[in-house]
Amino acid sequence: MAQEVVRKEMLAQGRIVAYRFDSLGTEAAEVWYADMEAMFLTMQDEDHLLMLIDMTRADNALLSAEAMMRGKQVGKIQYHGKTAFLVEAHDNTTMLDMFIDKGLPSTRLREVFISEAEAIAWLLAP
């Protein structure tokens, strides 16, 4: 049986979509991107997407080239919302911070957190 590389769940009574990654490799990037594409097809212009990207269980701490490419593609799509990245406290987030700051368009708010509760509070704040 194949290992699940990314799981999707809804938080805060369905207001936040959370993606929980077991890998940051190519397969996980493809699964996530396909789900994002499907979600964008059903979104209305006035919808706000609040997204939690949980990388705390990922078996590799660095984003694959495919994950960065898919992240850039999603980053170019125009929608309202915020994205919180959840990482382990001991993870070196320098590469992730650089990717967020330099690799993604500054069209939406994005922050890195080590506490899921703080990430959710930030996503739900106006």
Image: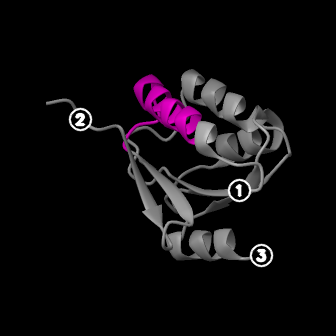
3D distance between C-alphas at marks 2 and 3: 37 Å
| Residue type, mark 1 in image | Asp
The residue under the point 58% across, 71% down is 120
Residue 17 in the image, given as x and y percentages of width and height: 52, 57
Assess whether residue 49 is covered by the magenta stretch. Answer: no
Where does the N terminus fall, quadrant-wise? top left
Q: Is mark 2 on a helix, strand or loop?
A: loop
Per the image, the residue denoted by label 2 is: 3
| Residue type, mark 3 in image | Pro
Determine crowd level at label 2: few under 14, some 14-19, many 20+ residues with C-alpha closer than 10 A: few
Mark nearer the N terminus (2 vs 1): 2
Per the image, the residue denoted by label 1 is: 47
User: In this rendering, does residue 23 appear at all?
Assistant: yes
Mark nearer the N terminus (3 vs 1): 1
Residue 124 figure quarter: bottom right
3D distance between C-alphas at marks 2 and 1: 32 Å
Determine crowd level at label 3: few under 14, some 14-19, many 20+ residues with C-alpha closer than 10 A: few
Question: Predominant secondary structure in magenta?
Answer: helix
| Residue type, mark 2 in image | Gln
Per the image, the residue denoted by label 3 is: 126
Q: Is mark 1 on a helix, strand or loop?
A: loop
* Pick the front one: 43 or 35: 43
3D distance between C-alphas at marks 3 and 1: 14 Å
* Pick the front one: 55 or 30: 30
Q: What stretch is highlighted in magenta?
A: 22-39
Residue 101 in the image, given as x and y percentages of width and height: 81, 44
Q: In this view, does 98 lie above or below 19?
A: above
* Pick the front one: 96 or 26: 26
